[in-house]
């Protein structure tokens, strides 16, 4: 399976964020997107997720099973954690698992993976910023999706939580998954390709 971006351009508010951008990333390796604030990292991830249209170019996922559109084959975790503060940690997990079509045992495994099991009965609004971020990231494990799109996933995470995130991503990749991660900091992935956005975007 491969994710391919072909001559992508993005214009927002009359400003060109990136142009003629091409990349290819295979199953088992993450694509780490870097660049200054405002360089288009979030716009690129949202375009891959189908939340924004590309001004030019196309994105495709080759070798996937079935004929589902790309937007239905990815998990997207943006800057917001998408949690209900009045619901408990377990209730948030149950909601997202049902919404994403996951099996009944997945929420508990996901909470275990992100160190949240002891907090399952606490309203999410009482959690620290780092704990809320972990709960937002836990939904990656609620249902299978081949492509993970992560926008600054380490925000508010301490060193231990960053290790949990890296372990989850590395396990996903080892199982043949794909990941595109926008970040300003190293995240401890086993291997990675890099894509830097700026005045001239170049892949390595």
Image: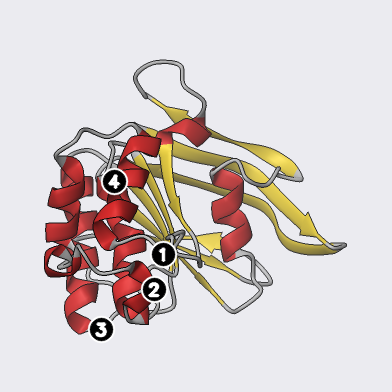
Residue that label 3 marks: 158
Q: Rounded to the nearest whole Å, what is the CA distance between mark 4 and mark 1?
A: 14 Å
Residue that label 1 marks: 86
On the image, the x and y values in percent for residue 104 come to: 19, 36
On the image, the x and y values in percent for residue 51 come to: 62, 45
Nearest to N terminus: mark 1 or mark 2: 1
Q: Rounded to the nearest whole Å, what is the CA distance between mark 1 and mark 2?
A: 6 Å
On the image, the x and y values in percent for residue 127 come to: 31, 77
Mark 3 or 4: the one toward you: 4
| Foreground of the two, 128 or 19 | 128
Q: Rounded to the nearest whole Å, what is the CA distance between mark 3 and mark 2?
A: 19 Å
Q: Element at badge 3?
A: loop
Check contact, mark 1 vs mark 2: CB within 8 A: yes
Q: Element at badge 2?
A: helix
Q: Is residue 29 in sight in this rendering?
A: no
Q: Rounded to the nearest whole Å, what is the CA distance between mark 1 and mark 3?
A: 24 Å
Residue that label 2 marks: 125
Residue that label 4 marks: 94
């Amino acid at each position: 399976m491969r994710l391919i971006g072909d001559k992508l351009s993005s214009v927002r508010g009359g400003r060109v964020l990136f142009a003629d951008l091409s990349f290819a990333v295979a199953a088992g390796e993450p694509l780490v997107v870097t660049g200054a604030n405002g360089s288009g990292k979030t716009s690129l991830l949202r375009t891959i997720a189908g939340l924004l249209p590309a001004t030019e170019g196309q994105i495709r996922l080759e070798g996937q099973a079935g004929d589902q559109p790309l937007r239905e084959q990815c998990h997207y975790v943006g800057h917001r954690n998408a949690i209900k503060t009045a619901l408990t940690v377990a209730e948030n997990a149950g909601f997202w698992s049902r919404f994403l079509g996951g099996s009944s045992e997945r929420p508990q495994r996901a909470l275990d993976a992100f160190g949240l099991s002891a907090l399952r009965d606490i309203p999410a609004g009482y959690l620290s910023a780092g704990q809320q971020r972990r709960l937002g990231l836990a939904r990656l494990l609620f249902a299978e999706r081949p492509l993970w799109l992560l926008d600054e996933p380490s925000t508010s995470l301490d060193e231990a939580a960053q290790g949990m995130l890296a372990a989850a991503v590395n396990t996903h990749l080892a199982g043949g998954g794909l990941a595109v991660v926008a970040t300003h900091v190293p995240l401890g992935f086993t291997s990675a390709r890099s894509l830097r956005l700026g005045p001239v975007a170049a892949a390595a």
